[in-house]
């Protein structure tokens, strides 16, 4: 996060943080790299990516937040407004690609939640709404909030010992499994990859948990 003196700017080096599956993520990033070239000059004087780019990128961002940090209604408002400004043709094209990006399953749940909370019309949805999964998504959103601050705040996490924090995080993965088994699987792969990679650091500090070194 850079502070230029006038405005704070968060710098990203990829068009999206992507999805957790490396195969779906490769397809997602290739699409976004191509689509980001189709920028449009807006009346305010700057260049903006296309609506198609935003529909895919922001849906992936919603999903990433949902699985990793927690998502709040703020992000759902952003996506609701984006859908309102999209055309039928743009939504159809994006919808045809969501399955290959690993976004279709949870996308249906998000569409239902957007209808339930904000009254999103059926003809503005990317995919058919999934009421069963949508109810579970909405319950998770109300429980966790943006960055998970409703569920467990930073003070609570710092107060947990290693064993309790480990079981809390693993239980979260199990609870989220129905939303996307693939995403949860790759989330756990990444966790254990990072754990093994950090073993030398754990040995150097003579501790099993190094979580509090970075939080």
Image (cartoon, rainbow, N blue to C red):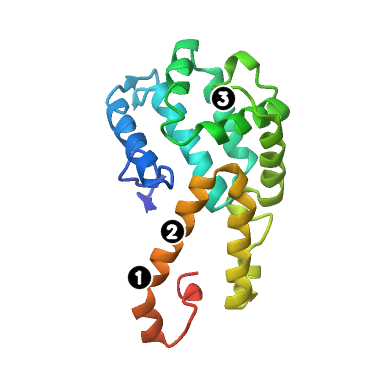
SS for dot 3: helix
Near mark 3 (Cα within 10 A), the count class, few <14, some 14-19 or many ≥20, is few
Comes first in the chain, label 2 or label 3: 3
189 vs 150, nearest the viewer:
189
Report if the CB atoms under discs 2 and 3 are less than 8 Å apart: no
Circle 1 SS class: helix
Looking at the image, residue 212 sits to the left or right of residue 178; the answer is: left
Give the quarter of the image for residue 117. Answer: top right
Q: Closer to the camera: disc 1 or disc 2?
A: 2
Mark number displayed over residue 197:
1
Considering depth in this image, is 6 or 122 the residue closer to the camera?
122
Task: Locate residue 107 relative to residue 118 in the image: left or right.
Answer: left
The residues tagged by marks 2 and 3 sit, at their Cα atoms, a distance apart of 35 Å
Choose mark 2 or mark 3, whichever is in front: 2
Q: Return the mark for residue 111.
A: none
Q: Residue at x 28, y 28 (%)?
A: 34
The residues bearing labels 1 and 2 have C-alpha atoms spaced at a distance of 12 Å
Which label sits on residue 189? 2
Q: How many marks?
A: 3
Percent across and percent down for residue 4 are 35, 49
Question: Against 44, is 211 above or below?
Answer: below
- Alpha carbon distance from label 3 to label 1: 41 Å
């Amino acid at each position: 996060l850079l502070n230029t003196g006038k405005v704070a700017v968060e710098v990203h080096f990829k068009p999206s943080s992507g999805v957790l599956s490396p195969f779906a993520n490769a397809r997602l990033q290739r699409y976004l790299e191509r689509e980001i070239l189709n920028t449009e000059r807006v009346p305010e004087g700057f260049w903006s990516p296309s609506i198609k780019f935003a529909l895919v990128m922001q849906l992936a961002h919603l999903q990433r937040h949902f699985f990793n940090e927690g998502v709040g209604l703020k992000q759902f408002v952003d996506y609701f407004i984006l859908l309102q400004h999209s055309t039928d043709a743009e939504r159809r094209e994006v919808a045809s690609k969501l399955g290959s990006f690993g976004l279709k399953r949870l996308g249906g749940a998000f569409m239902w939640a957007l209808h339930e909370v904000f009254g999103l019309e059926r003809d503005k949805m990317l995919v058919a709404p999934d009421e069963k999964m949508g109810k579970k998504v909405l319950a998770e959103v109300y429980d966790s909030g943006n960055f998970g601050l409703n569920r467990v705040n930073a003070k609570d996490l710092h107060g947990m010992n290693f064993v309790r924090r480990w079981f809390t995080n693993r239980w979260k993965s199990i609870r989220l499994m129905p939303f996307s088994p693939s995403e949860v699987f790759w989330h756990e792969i990444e966790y254990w990859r990072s754990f093994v990679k950090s073993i030398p650091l754990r040995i150097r500090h003579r501790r099993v948990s190094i979580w509090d070194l970075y939080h």
